[in-house]
Image: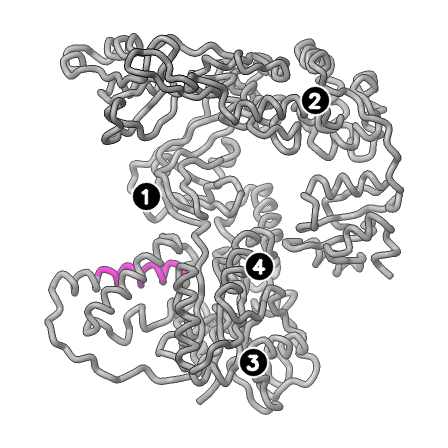
Amino acid sequence: MSDIFDPQLDLFATAEEPSTEKTPVDTPVPAEATAKWRDLVTEINQMRFDYYNLDAPTASDAEYDVLFEELKDLEAKWPMLVTPDSPTQTVGGSAVNTFAPVAHRIPMLSLDDVFSVEATHQWLDRCLTGLGMNQVEILAEVKVDGLAVSILYENGLLTRAATRGDGRVGEDVTANVLTISNVPRQLTGDFPASVEVRGEIYFPIADFLDFNEQRALRGEKTFVNARNAAAGSLRQKDPAETAKRPLAMVCHGIGIYEGGQSQPDSQHAWYEQLKAWGLPVSEYTRLISTHAEIDEVIEYFGKHRADLSHEIDGMVFKVDSRQYQAALGTTSRAPRWAAAYKFPPTEVHTRLLDIRTQVGRTGRVTPYGVMEKVLVAGSHVSSATLHNQDEVKRKGVLIGDMVILRKAGDVIPEILGPVESLRDGSERAFVMPSHCPSCGAPLAPAKEGDVDLRCPNQASCPAQITQRISFMGGRSAFDIEGLGDESALALTQPEVNRFEVISALAAGEPVLLAETDTSEDKTIQLDSFTRENLHHGELITQAEQLLPRPSETVLTSEADIFNLTANAVKDVYVWKYGKFPRNVADETGYEEGWRQIRAFWSTGRRLKSGEWAKGQEPKPTQDLTKMLDQLEKAKQQPLWRVLNALSIRHVGPTASQALADHFRSLDALQQASVAELAAVEGVGQIIAEAVVAWFQVDWHKHIVNTWAASGVRMEDEATEELPQTLAGLTIVVSGTMPGYDRESAKAAIIARGAKASSSVSKKTSLVVAGPGAGSKATKAETLGVPLVDETKFQLLLDEGLEAVLA
């Protein structure tokens, strides 16, 4: 038997021939089961070809997994359907004619997936039972989402590289792999006469984003995702093209091993050996042994997957001991001693139903996609940003397309691009509106050459007011719990959904009206006679007459936000879509549709007499009470938060902190000239001009004066200046820093006298690289710039450069 290693999923296995044991046939396979099996095999094989050979998937990983599990279940029920070339018995992909074929002396196997924590526990229990043990060490690794390769080193020199293909025959990509910077041409140390290293080629996340940005600036089509970009880059016919793309590799095992010393006896020891030879290995592996530790690593990497340097789509768990691996054995397709836990998908396919526009807090009008609701990254998504009209054209998406949607963690959902092969000709192009969708003002660029269109009606455009008030409550501004999107909308546009409610009534749908001081909850609906005898315009009029008068708008400017009272919002009602009781009296059965609810006060409960039940009159909700309390506390927030909350164009948290630290009061800031503002470290000419221009507008001054009159603090108290431990230095922080977000880390550097730069150059004094640092760490090493990890960030702030380099 020979040691083999799965290159895509980091697994050793023991070579075995497929089982020849026949399953007794007691019952004929129904015709419908056979037909279903053929359909599933055909569809899965096509998906595999599109994914592995064309690097242009027509289905998401989640859709593939559903079909694959369906095929496994069907074959489990009817074992006589299983054939040696079934997808459940083979590895995805095949060799194509673009490159010379390479036969793998030791096959590159696949791995069985599990989709729940419980299934991972069951896999571990099966391993323990098979070994007759109560506990065994397990190696947990992240599952790199890249392209599997094997690299042959002879006498330490790289002589051949090949893709996995179908597991037995791959493609010769030697010339292209030689261009990858972290793949050594010559091994170091005590290496064997012949060794085949297996691993994943991937696009580092930071490099992928930069690479796409540069392509967009050149007017070239951008890549949809990093995995397909890596695969396509490795298959370039011209190695010079591959060399232009910042690919990287991570190694996770050995295939052939000849003419060397005795091999390591565990998986993790193999990684130490690979590293000693100068090969890149993952920094994210952990040795564990219990169910609880499995849960812990799944939870940790599930939360931090966006912080890693490369994309992952799950975790790989395997028995660490090679002796125990051999004892557990393998099937024809995958080892029994390993399992891959799949995270909920971050990329799915869904239908783009429409492209609409929305207005931001600075007047920028952006398109967004309205899609068929789909589950992605653990939450249901039905809309996603498209940034601007040029981005829509660049992505090439049409209304009606099947699109690829991505959502990772807390990242805003994004439409990556269309699945062009699924178009049927009914799709249509998006046309950007010429007028504001909120207030109707003509749209125009802020200045000549701008891509973005903006609504100039900043003072009274309802959408802009809503967005500015919502932003005020955010963490980078006043940080007011309860003042988010929904509250801001209720305060500024409580009737924003009114016409949709009227349209629903005109279509015959029921609508539930909320109780008021003079009536109780009731369901309204146009009767069939009215709907059959009135034309559409009359139906709309009739439906509108059924609704109560619109709620009054509480805020028409952010100026009065700090003067809110509970009584001022008592009669604010909003329209929500969802389920409500079909019979209000006894709540038996439910309808789905629009309902009217109080935004800030409880509903209350009435007696049959019509009187309020004692102690159950409408009253302020706990959320409202908390929001009002938070508004009062927010009046004492530091000056930089006040400045950031004003929504001055180009002024974010970093510039706000720099300006606040320098001028100490809003009055001093208003009196400063462009030159004085621009001279502040971290500000510059563009921000300086934006600040001066903002304070020259009368309604802007009104906001500041009203906030001041309401008790908002407009100057910082005198504090002891922080030690200037970093004076004169240029520091680049990349990745995650413990105890800091991106903006606060930059602010901490600036407060200690350094310039916080976003790019690495020869003038950079130091790069601090945390998880997810990407290309900046690599560039620092290339340029000879000092580099430390995130654990030394606080020491750098406290004691300076020499302390971290000592």
Name the residue tied to disc 3. 266
Q: Residue at x 67, y 43 (%)?
A: 741
In the rendered image of this protein, does residue 692 appear above or below residue 735? above
| Quadrant of the rendering where the N terminus is positioned | bottom left
Q: Position of residue 781 (x, y in %)?
A: 75, 60
Q: Which mark is residue 423?
A: 1
- Is 266 in the magenta? no
* Residue where numbered disc 2 is placed: 635
Q: Is residue 213 above or below residue 359?
A: below
| Mark 3 residue type | Ser
Q: Nearer the viewer, mark 2 or mark 3?
A: 2
Classify residue 460 by image quadrant.
top right
Task: Name the image quarter holding the C terminus.
Answer: bottom right
Which is more toward the observer, 379 or 701?
A: 379
Most common SS among magenta residues: helix
Q: Does the image show residue 169?
A: no
Image location of residue 382, percent across then percent down: 40, 37
